[in-house]
Each structure stands twice: as structure tokens, then as C-alpha cells.
Amino acid sequence: MNIKRLIVILNILSIFILTGCKNTKDINYNSDIKVNGPSLKISLIQTAYEIYTTNIENLSNNSTYEDLYNNTSRAAKKHYKWLTKTYNSMDDDMKFKLKNIFDSNSSWSYTNSVINLDDNASVSDIVDTLISSKNLSLSSDLQMI
């Protein structure tokens, strides 16, 4: 009786395994997939956010953040220096606006606002879209950028 039970269980398992398998020759693959690099509309926002994060948001944690870049790779250390140099080259008004931009909305909110723009959108198109976005509720000083 135990052998009959074992045979029944093995048959049931075999059926489950065989019905779950498919012949891969029947699958049609779409080879028209195109992978693009980051577009300007995303790069502008993410770069500004990284400058903000490095120089404003993590100001109290700056040594830890700097260590992260410095101990990752030479390229990361160079990038960190570029982020701080770029921020330090801004005038006070620009620094204030950068702070207000990301204090009021997340980088994702800005990215979400421009995501439907064409990948070849100009800086003017991107700025106009952000300023006119109802979802962002930008303060009046940011609407005059």
C-alpha cells in the first residue's frame, strides 16, 4: 500500500512539473527594445538634487557624507569635489532658491512633472513645465526663475 501511495504522489508531482513547463521555441521575443541614456529633463533635476543633498540637506552630517564619496572611488571623490565646488560658486540667492526648491518638493515630484516631455526637451521647456505644474505649488520666488 505504501508503494501505491508513493507512485500516486510521484505521478501527481510529475503532472504538476510537466504542466508548468513550456517550450521556449514558441515564445516570440521583441528585439526592438531601445535603451537610452539619461535625458536632460531627468539629469537636470537629479544633479540639482544631488548638489542640494550634498551641500544643504546633509550639512549636519557632512563629514560622514564626504567620507562616503571619498572612500568609494577616485571618481566618486572627484564628483564630490565637483558637487561642493559647484554649490560654493553659486551666489546666495541661487543657494536660497536651491534650498527652497527641494525643501518644498521631492526630486521625484519634479521628475514626475517633466517625465512626459520629449527626451530632447530644451532647458526652457523643462523650466516652463516645472513653473506651470499645478502639482508642485511653487512659491512665488521660484516661479520667477
Image (cartoon, rainbow, N blue to C red):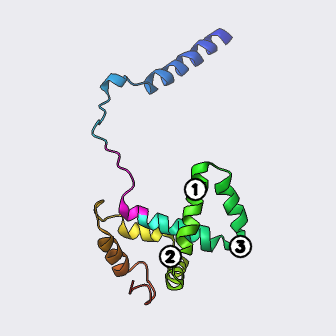
- Closer to the observer: label 1 or label 2? 1
Residue 141, percent across and down?
A: 44, 89
Figure check: 101 above or below 49? below
Q: Residues within 10 Å of mark 1 (few under 14, many from 20)?
A: few
The Cα atoms of the two marked residues, 1 and 2, are separated by: 28 Å
Eyeballing the image, is 65 above or below 59? above
**x, y percent for residue 123:** 33, 70
Residue nearest the observer in this picture, 79 or 54: 79
The kind of secondary structure element at disc 2 is loop
* Element at label 1: helix
Q: What crowding class fits label 3: few (fewer than 14 Cα within 10 Å), some (14-19), or many (20 or more)?
A: few
Residue 105: image tag: 2
Name the residue: 59% across, 12% down: 7
Taken as a whole, is the magenta stretch helix, strand or loop?
Answer: loop
Q: Is residue 38 magenta?
A: yes
Q: Which residue is mark 1?
A: 78
Amino acid type shown at disc 2: Asn
Q: Residue at x 63, y 14 (%)?
A: 6
State the SS at label 3: helix
Q: Quadrant of the N terminus?
A: top right
Q: Which residues are magenta?
A: 34-43
Q: Nearer the viewer, residue 12 or 31?
A: 31
Q: Amino acid at mark 1?
A: Lys
Residue that numbered label 3 is attached to: 60
Q: Is residue 91 magenta?
A: no
x and y percentages locating residue 145 in the rendered image? 39, 83
